[in-house]
Image (cartoon, grey):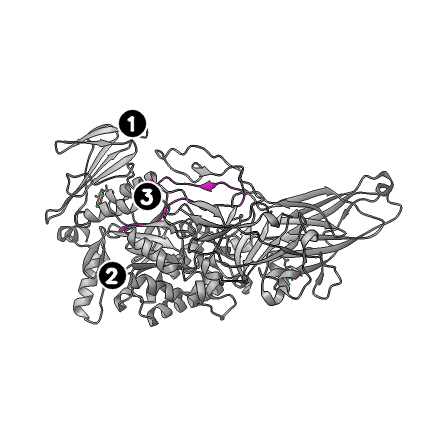
Amino acid sequence: MGSIWKMLGISGLVFTVLFLSLVCSSVRADVSYDDKAFIINGKRRILVSGSIHYPRSTPEMWPDLIQKAKDGGLDVIQTYVFWNGHEPSPGKYNFEGRFDLVKFIKLVHQSGLYVHLRIGPYVCAEWNFGGFPVWLKYVPGIEFRTDNQPFKVAMQRFVQKIVDMMKSESLFEPQGGPIIMSQIENEYGPVEWELGAAGKAYTAWAAKMAVGLDTGVPWIMCKQDTAPDPIIDTCNGFYCEGFRPNKPYKPKMWTEAWSGWYTQFGGPVPHRPAEDLAFSVARFVQNNGSFFNYYMYHGGTNFGRNAAGLFVATSYDYDAPIDEYGLLNEPKWGHLRDLHKAIKQSEAALVSSYPTVTWPGKNQEVHVFRSKSGACAAFLSNYDRTYPTKLTFRNIQYDLPPWSISILPDCKTEVYNTARISSMSSQAKMVPISGDLSWQSYNEQTPSADDSDTLAMDGLWEQINVTRDSSDYLWYLTEVGIASDEGFLKSGQWPLLTVMSAGHALHVFINGLLSGTVYGSLDSTKLTYGGNVDLRAGINKISLLSVAVGLPNAGMHYERWNTGVLGPVTLQGLNEGTRDLTKQRWSYKAGLKGESLSLDTVSGSSSVEWIEGLLLAQKQPLTWYKTTFDAPEGSDPLAIDMISMGKGEIWINGQSIGRHWPGYKAKGSCGECNYAGTFSEKKCQRGCDQPSQRWYHLPRSWLKSSGNLLVVFEEWGGDPTQISLVKRTT
Ligand SMILES: *[C@@H]1O[C@H](CO)[C@@H](O)[C@H](O)[C@H]1NC(C)=O
Ligand SMILES: *[C@@H]1O[C@H](CO)[C@@H](O)[C@H](O)[C@H]1NC(C)=O
């Protein structure tokens, strides 16, 4: 049926919608699409969108972030919905504070922008467990993201809950709200391919379920070219100009134009030049693109223990146009604002015509859009990575820098070139705030197997099975008896203890003393401790503190991946040869004593004796530190400089601001970043051989004017007297 609708200039889908609204006047189809544009209340649009994830900033920051997005030329704010934040235990919902989804959407609405709601509920997102609550893993018979009844029941219940909530608040566009589209699942294409028939059946079910919820706005599936009609399949990537949706009547959408990349502890800080990002977007639009979304427009912070596995850092800055602290990342923000202006000036031509493409010279390409009403816009490209070029178009000569696109909204006047930046650069600085912090310390003891709150079992248990992720920490405690006639006692050749762990970090204590620390690499969370240990005749205590650093957020059946000490655990060098400790009696204690005492709160911290002055613990493992301070004046965003610390977690007034790990130095390749080329997250990075993350965002709204309680738990040992408060300025 394509050709006749093409002649009429409308697609079958639009026609169906129009037809339905004629026969059934109660149906108001306010958001529809064809292959060239989204059509909102009858107006054809090229939509500029950006991701801001509500829990990655504070409600107090939201209005300013949204305003800056609007000033940057965005039409749409895109966000995932974070199931584990909303349903921390089955049936117990949380829509408060940073998880106040309705408030966030209403703020976007008030500013006049639209919302793209990616319900998922699988979201990946470098977010703990990909957004799934950990309890979901323990639903009997469950398998994630496949044709599995318990999973489908749980998923549908949550998706329905969110859709009902949006409907009851009248937040979908046909109800007068800002939500113009939704997403079901997330990047499922490669998983479906691996799973085969079960994956296909699940896709068909998910699509039908979503469409059946009758939201009145289109659904999309990203990175999934099998998306069933009427769901739109979309592209995610650094470049998406070559992407084609799976049906000719669907619009070409780029749900994730990566503005940078995330940082991992142990890795450098990725940087994507503004020129290359603008180039990729202009190239997408000139190739029929109708919707693009910056992932991220504001990345924000992985507060608490929300960062995902493989050591995703607490900062989720992403080199986004608005930085982690809510400040403009210039020149990126301004350069993209100028790009959006040029695209908007060209919109009338873009939404109603296909481009005519010509190749006037080597590495030169010209796209001309001409609408029936007379609008004309041209995009002139130079694909050469090294040399500028002179391109003649309609008898006028245009100078194009290498790897760049010029936009001529009237087919004549160049208003923008992706490689020529006219907005100012800014270098954000961290400025120390004067005034020393006065610290007190409290030592976390290694627990004893006979403590009442330990659990004794034969053999080694998987970590999350025991902790249910209530803490990063799980103690594995056991004892080894050493006879007084052991040869090593005389020779002084200590026996070798070997501990194999699925990850992610491990501290080994022998009779209460730290014997060693190991942690996984960015390629694998697995680790092995091997060390000669000082055992004495009699009973020796082996205490292993296994540390999880976020749960996996992606991968086939990641719900089956293990964490913690699964063995084998062996002792070599005894008279008997090798002693296997794997299957013997182990006691378990989930979490730290300081966590169960809530040392991060005022009341909890007053329940123990703190040490200060000359006796303050320094460079000692497993130490709690606390201090109080008054809120610094002004409104600059604040951070804590943790350069002198190793690894652990930070709280302000009882709220976790995330894991710190400045002890993990960035390994990788850094260097001059040449924007003219195919970008990859491995190419352009900064900060090699330095801590991957030194500064930790302290939201202003979490401070009182005086007497703020700052608590740090330090695993490795550090010098708290060097910790300082800083403000971020540009
Ligand atoms: C734009 O879309 C039309 C219709 O599908 C197609 O023929 C044309 O090749 C596309 N042009 C580009 C540059 O992608
Ligand atoms: C998980 O815990 C259950 C008991 O709750 C136990 O039976 C099972 O062996 C544990 N599995 C692993 C892999 O540790």
Give the CA distance from mark 2 to mark 3.
24 Å
The part of the chain drawn in magenta is: 250-274
| Lower sequence index among marks 2 and 3 | 2
Question: Could you say which disc has been placed on residue 31 in the image?
Answer: 2
Residue 666 seen from this side: yes
User: Does residue 596 lie above or below 659 as drawn?
Assistant: below
User: Residue 339 or 62: which is nearer the viewer?
Assistant: 62
Q: Amino acid at mark 3?
A: Cys
Q: Disc 1 vs disc 2: which is toward the camera?
A: 1
Q: Which residue is mark 3?
A: 240
User: Does residue 637 lie above or below 280 as drawn?
Assistant: below
- Residue 367: x and y, percent? 20, 39
**Per the image, is 267 magenta?**
yes
For the point 49% across and 65% down, the residue is: 150
- Residue 128: x and y, percent? 50, 55
Q: Amino acid at mark 1?
A: Tyr
User: Does residue 397 lie above or below 348 as drawn?
Assistant: above
Q: Which residue is mark 1?
A: 387
